[in-house]
Amino acid sequence: MNPNPDLARSRQFVRSAVLPPPPPRTRSAADSVDEALQAGKAQAAVVGSDLVSFATRVAPQWRQDLMNCSLFAQLCAKAEVPDPKRIFDWYDAYFGALQQLGWMVQDQGFAVYVETSQNFSAHEAILKVAEGLLMPSMGSVALVKSTLEALASLDQNSPFLTLFSRESQQASAARFQVSLAEQAADGGLSVALMAFGLEAKTTLTQVLFFKSLASQATLRHCSGKVSINTGLLEALRPDLEEQLKDHARSFIRKLPAKLLQPR
């Protein structure tokens, strides 16, 4: 896959993509209280199997664009690799779609997460991967941590966790992403992208907070800082919005900002 696609090729890719049909839409309390995207405020959203956080300086339009990129790439991967057990084939398709949208994804190799204790905790493993990628920026690590804690504070039947579980896990296997978007020093956009594949010997429940004996679970991860071709992404915005118009409300839920406040 060409990591630097031109506009014509990318536009054709977006316009010709055949996405899976959206799931049946059911009404919930969250439908009438969806958070607005706001400048100057840390925010987070569940986008399918991606938990996305936004630092304060990321403009609202870019927040929406990045959510659309994540959702589009997930749907493309789901259409190309419908078998949920083929976790890493799914990721090949996912990363390839992001590249077509102007994401400069470099390393796509997955490493096995090594747990040094007898017990495995997905939540703690995610934070250790985040610390390795984001340090020494304590503010960035804190935002990822507060986003995870926000989800942990919700009722297990909340629409946020229901959506994430539906899109990330299947029996004893799961794949999910944790992303943090920030404004880069040059004024562009940078995304810390962490992708995970979890395989366990027991049925997975609440995958972000799954716990087991370390010998009973294998977590693989791929992480890196990704720069965004904002000019390309801006040009693709109308095509992405058109492709996702029937999917967005079924796959994107913005977390209430109050949940991200330090406690």
Image (cartoon, grey):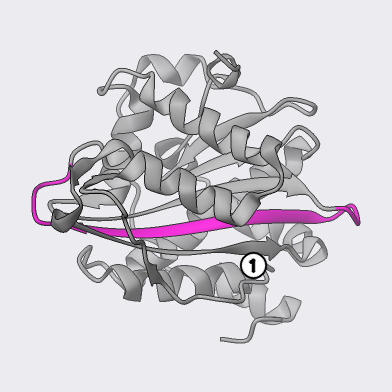
Residue 248: % across, % down: 49, 42
Question: Which residue sits furthest right?
Answer: 186
Q: Locate the N terminus and report the quarter of the image it occupies.
A: bottom right
> Label 1, on which residue?
101
**x 56%, y 38%: residue:** 144
The answer to whether 94 is drawn above or below residue 115 in the figure is: below
Residue 34: % across, % down: 53, 21
Left or right of 63? Residue 57 is right
Mark 1 falls on what kind of element? loop
* Main SS class of the magenta portion in the image: strand
Q: Locate the C terminus and report the quarter of the image it occupies.
A: top right
* Magenta highlight on residue 44: no
* Magenta highlight on residue 203: yes
**x 73%, y 61%: residue:** 233
Residue 127: % across, % down: 47, 43
**x 31%, y 48%: residue:** 167
